[in-house]
Image (cartoon, rainbow, N blue to C red):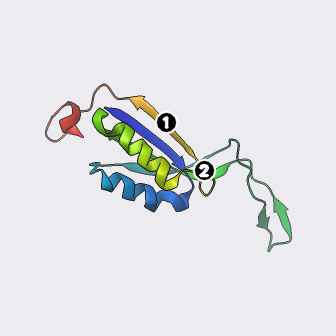
Amino acid sequence: MKKIEVVIPDRALPELNAVFKEFNVGGMTHYRVEGRGRGQAKPVSVGRGTSHYVPEFIPRTKVEAVVPDSKAEEIISRILDKIGGPSYGGKIFVSEMPVAIDLKTRERGESAI
């Protein structure tokens, strides 16, 4: 199994969700994160628009999903096709997931996901 973590702008979440649904990925988790990287933050207006500042951290959405090894590369390719390129930006991180256990059924491995 592979754990796919994708850090994207908030507006790309519906398209990423559609990719995971397309491959029948059983579940995913998303949450709001902030960070900094190569991208530059845009100035933000404060105080009724009378002053501006550039935030150090940029808000993003992080999505995590555990997928079978057999589907991982295909899913990653589809993510790159769908939301890759200059319009969104972001990162994909892939790591091995040695064990998954379903708390309700006690199933282990790929059947748990």
What residue is rendered at 51% in x and 54% in y?
83
Q: CA distance from mark 1 to mark 2?
A: 14 Å
What is the number of the mark on residue 38? Answer: none
What residue is rendered at 74% in x and 50% in y?
40
Does residue 102 show up? no
What is the number of the mark on residue 89? Answer: 2
**Helix, strand, or loop for circle 2?**
loop
**Is 12 rendered above or below residue 49?**
above
Does residue 40 appear to the left or right of 104 in the view shown?
A: right
Q: Residue 8: where, in percent of width, then height?
A: 54, 51
Residue found at the very far bottom of the displayed protein: 48
Residue found at the very far left of the displayed protein: 105
Q: Which residue type does callout 1 highlight?
A: Phe
Q: Nearer the viewer, residue 66 or 44?
A: 66
Q: Which residue type does callout 2 highlight?
A: Gly
- Which image quadrant for residue 73? top left
Q: Nearer the viewer, residue 36 or 82?
A: 82
Q: Tally the marks.
A: 2
Does residue 1 show up? yes
Does residue 9 appear to the left or right of 66 in the view shown?
A: right
**Is 81 rendered above or below residue 97?**
below
Does residue 36 appear to the left or right of 64 in the view shown?
A: right
Which residue is identified by label 1? 93
Q: Quadrant of the C terminus?
A: top left
**Callout 1: 10 Å neighbours few (<14), some, many (20+)?**
few
Q: Residue 42: where, in percent of width, then height?
A: 75, 58
Q: Residue 29: where, in percent of width, then height?
A: 39, 49
